[in-house]
Amino acid sequence: MTVPLLSLIVVSLAVGTVGTFLAGKWARWVALGATVVFLLEVAVLFVAYPGWPGYDSALVPGFANGETYSWISVTWLHINYSVGVDGISLVLILLTAILQLATVVYSWEESKRPAAYFGLVQLTCLGCFGVFVALDVLLFFLFWEAVLVPMFFLVGYWGGPQRRYAALKFFIYTHVASIVMLVGLLAMAFYSGASSFDFSAIYASARGLSTVVQTFLFLALFFGFGVKFPIVPFHTWLPDAHVEAPTGGSVLLAGLLLKLGGYGLIRWAVETLPSGFHTLQPLLYLVAFVSIIWGSVLSLAQRDMKRLVAYSSINHMGIVLLGIALGTSLGLTAAVLLMFAHGVVSALLFMASGSVHHTFGTRDIPEVGGITPTTPTLSTLIMVGSLASLGLPALISFPAEFLALLATWNSLAYWVAIPLAILVVTAGFYIWMMQRMLFGPPKGIPAEAHDVPWYEGASMAMLVVLIVLFGILPGLLVNVILSSPIHGFPGT
């Protein structure tokens, strides 16, 4: 008897989401229970990879735990419920489970309509999981859009003073990009003459399209996925959404939603349209370098801790795009590893900025100083997150950025000087932040200031453990990524 593990996870997440919405004052407990179950299921998925006993992975070629069921089949329209995982998606699924648990625990004392808040968190993670396992164009798009709705409400209802503006801007940017992405995916399926909307069918057919057609299709998909990445100049929704979002929303936004863009670009554009990818490779390099530079330069000018971390995300996603643009196995491995690293590190920093605001009533860096004697735990967590983000050895970002720089050197030689120099700038603004906030004479500390409560400290401590663990043993993730048969990725 076979076990449809991926469908079982989807169902359990859906049940947990509905149960959380209906749980009233018990919502946080239901959300915690559903989250723990999800994490255990992902652990089983890791143990079972690359195939659940008794399951025929050939159901979805190249993917483990594959499931394919006919869904809509009328005349020329063949839409299936097709899901599966490989090493790339599996690492990002692990990130989803980790951040879901961290968000639920961090938000434990949320008092403003907690059932709706925790339910939307669950729904966001359900959509992200669906994106990472969906192997049918329409199924992929449904999960993709399912992420947009809960995040819109998380920002628009639980956010800061300008929450409605930020939520509407986020919705317009990402929804317009989603429409372009859908048109590109459907055009790829129709132009290639694929027998269905399944990834395997499109992959087998689209690679034979002419270079001109592939180039236009790749450009549409690059725009669609790139806005959520986000790429410069379509990045301006990100700082506004981050600053106005509640802390849990910022964690999911930076930790998961940005990764959807990178994953989609790898899975549905680079793998399936190699000629278009090679034609537009110079454009990808240009956008990647501009994003790396622009994100760091803007971070230098920020006073708000949360906005500083938001702009640094643009810098890190630029490095991810550079790894993808290189078109090599090493570059892709670096990109996926850096997506995981950024997800964990940015989550820690956004949680820390939320705790700073809760404790001191402001996130303005120059207005708060010398907080270490008053809040030693929070100061330690801020320092670990900052050092990890700037790429300190033995922390998770170091092996990811080192692989990205090595891949860049192998392919572009001295162009590696650009991201290498920007790493110095990144170190500069994080050291500036730590020097002013953590050290020196106390400044702007209210009499009632106290260290982080247990639920905030526990969630951040969990992320610190992972930052150190995968910083010392990155092979635990790299081996999973490399075990994936990368479908025709150029240079592999």
Image (cartoon, rainbow, N blue to C red):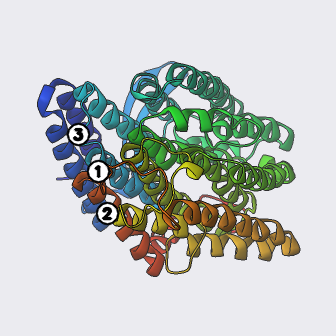
Instruction: Work out how far the residue at label 2 is from the one at label 1, CA to CA, in angstroms.
Output: 10 Å
Residue to which mark 1 is pinned: 101
Q: Answer whether labels 2 and 1 touch (C-beta < 8 Å).
A: yes
Mark 2 surroundings within 10 Å by alpha-carbon count, few (fewer than 14), some (14 through 19), many (20 or more): some
Percent position (x, y) of residue 74? 47, 18
**Badge 3 amino acid:** Glu
Determine which residue is flagged by label 3: 109
Specify whether residue 55 is in view.
Answer: no
* Whether residue 419 can be seen here: yes
What's the distance in space between the residues labelled 3 and 2, CA to CA? 18 Å
Residue topped by disc 2:
462
Nearest-to-viewer mark from 3 and 1: 3
Q: Is residue 41 left or right of residue 379?
A: left
Q: Secondary structure at mark 2?
A: helix
Residue toward you, 15 or 99: 99
Callouts 3 and 1 close, C-beta under 8 Å = no
Q: Are marks 3 and 2 in contact (CB under 8 Å)?
A: no
